């Protein structure tokens, strides 16, 4: 991510004095209301404090906030905010991320509940983040949280890939989700606290983020009162998903995931592994996102339909190179055991995610004595199930309301 602003320009754009701008690294600061016409790539709100300043803050600390236009949810939401918060990347380095908090009109005065909804954004640039898409009304899943809002549940939608768009990087993503929850709980205007019950939900890229946050929560954020998790379209093993889409309709997901992962592993110089065509692909795809056509951004999928990875990688055995295999192993689900009750749904006909991997993950969770309601949907492919969130939402809302979960592990 590259910014060409000097301090004066940043301060002017933000409507702040230079003194106020410097303070964003040190204390929670209110910014002017967001404008739907300003995108993250040229919006100073998204410029993080220094690593040094972030190191002095605890994960989940709100660094700055601003109100956002509420046209998308105006019928249901009384207040909506963007929060920049302190988090930790996959290497343990302090960093910052942005989340969006929706406070419904029906929220109770006390004993509030929170749904962390991981939108299925798969992006290599910041304009396709949930925070930006919520402001401009182009979030694909914008209606999916309405049932939670109508029930008085606060909703947080975090840009879990972070400011570098580290797509599919497991630990970075998990930390982003969990610290987004912490930030919502610590935000003075939310009415939440550290004991507020929390649910997680997401599908596809959002399912990946949900699953990783769920597995990492006991070790990274044990104080979060996580009561229920719904997720589907899970890329359990990155290698198997890559091999499944290679040369097919969704081939771009393989190539984009490699670029996103390389940002989380800077010791890996991707240019050492690509052909001349691969170098051009990396440069081009780095400005794209899946569903970009819907979101008014460059589309990732269409330019790379039915392209084979052999065109882009020097090695015909790229995924089995020792250094690549190590990264894949580190980003495969199932190495940590979550605690919260889960609803997992997967389409037998999923064109992207191998269902055998999900079967194996569920078997592993069940063997550990976890509560899993697993639904293998015989007629569901990846895109069809992306538009079918109702049962997952019902599961999470039931857990937030204190109803016991059922398991079909046996």
Image: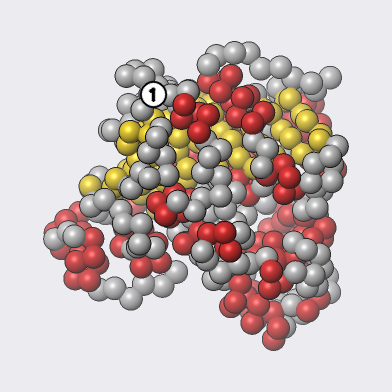
Quadrant in which the C terminus is drawn = top right
Judge by depth and name the residue closer to the eye, 387 or 340: 387
Give the farthest residue toward the top: 403
Q: Nearer the viewer, residue 34 or 264?
A: 34
Left-right relation of 20 to 384: left
User: Can you say whether 47 is above or below 84 in the image?
Assistant: below
> 309 left or right of 64?
right
Q: Which residue is drawn at 60% across and 45% down?
A: 206
Element type where label 1 sits in the image: loop
Q: Quadrant of residue 318?
A: bottom right
* Residue 84 in sight here: yes
Going by the image, does 231 lie left or right of 367?
A: left
Which residue is painted at 73% across and 45% down in the image?
A: 384
Residue 191 rendering spot, x and y as whole percentages: 32, 26
Number of callouts: 1
State left or right for residue 259 relative to residue 324: left
Give the image location of residue 347, x and y in percent.
79, 41
| Pointer 1 residue | 106
Category of crowding for the residue at label 1, using alpha-carbon neighbours closer than 10 angstroms: few (below 14), some (14–19), many (at least 20): some
Q: In this view, does 149 lie above or below 330?
A: above
For this orientation, the residue located farthest to the bottom is: 276
Quarter in which the N terminus is drawn = bottom left
Q: Which residue is drawn at 78% across and 79% down?
A: 311
Q: Is residue 220 visible?
A: no
Q: Residue 67: x, y in percent?
A: 29, 45
Residue 168 vs residue 302, the one in the foreground: 302
Q: Where is residue 396 in the image (x, y as percent from the top left)?
A: 59, 26
Q: Residue at x 47, y 42 (%)?
A: 157
């Amino acid at each position: 991510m590259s910014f060409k602003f000097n301090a004066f320009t940043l301060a002017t754009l933000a409507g702040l004095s230079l003194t106020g701008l410097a303070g964003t690294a040190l204390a929670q600061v209110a910014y002017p209301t967001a404008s739907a016409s300003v995108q993250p790539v040229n919006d100073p709100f998204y410029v993080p404090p220094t690593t040094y300043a972030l190191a002095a803050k605890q994960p989940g600390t709100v660094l700055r906030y601003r109100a956002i236009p509420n046209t998308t949810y105006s019928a249901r939401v009384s207040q909506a905010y963007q929060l920049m918060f302190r988090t930790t990347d996959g290497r343990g380095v302090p960093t910052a991320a942005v989340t969006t908090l929706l406070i419904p009109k029906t929220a109770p005065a006390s004993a509030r509940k929170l749904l962390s909804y991981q939108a299925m954004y798969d992006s290599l640039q910041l304009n396709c983040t949930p925070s930006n898409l919520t402001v401009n009304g182009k979030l694909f899943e914008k209606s999916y949280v309405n049932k939670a809002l109508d029930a008085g549940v606060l909703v947080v939608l975090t840009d879990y890939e972070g400011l570098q768009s580290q797509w599919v990087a497991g630990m970075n993503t998990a930390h982003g989700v969990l610290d987004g929850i912490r930030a919502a709980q610590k935000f003075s205007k939310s009415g939440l606290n550290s004991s507020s019950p929390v649910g997680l939900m997401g599908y596809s890229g959002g399912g990946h983020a949900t699953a990783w946050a769920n597995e990492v929560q006991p070790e990274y954020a044990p104080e979060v009162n996580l009561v229920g998790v719904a997720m589907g379209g899970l890329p359990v093993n990155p290698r198997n998903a890559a091999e499944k889409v290679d040369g097919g309709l969704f081939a771009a997901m393989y190539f984009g995931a490699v670029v996103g992962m390389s940002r989380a592993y800077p010791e890996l110089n991707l240019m050492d592994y690509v052909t001349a065509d691969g170098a051009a692909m990396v440069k081009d795809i780095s400005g794209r996102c899946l569903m970009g056509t819907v979101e008014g951004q460059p589309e990732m999928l269409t330019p790379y339909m039915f392209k084979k990875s052999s065109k882009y990688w020097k090695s015909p055995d790229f995924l089995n190179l020792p250094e690549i295999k190590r990264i894949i192993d580190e980003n495969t689900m199932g190495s940590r055991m979550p605690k919260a009750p889960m609803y997992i749904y997967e389409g037998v006909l999923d064109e992207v995610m191998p269902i055998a991997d999900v079967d194996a993950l569920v078997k592993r969770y069940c063997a550990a004595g976890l509560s899993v309601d697993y639904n293998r949907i015989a007629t569901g492919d990846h895109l069809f199930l992306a538009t079918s969130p109702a049962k997952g939402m019902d599961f999470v809302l039931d857990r937030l309301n204190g109803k016991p979960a059922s398991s079909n592990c046996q």
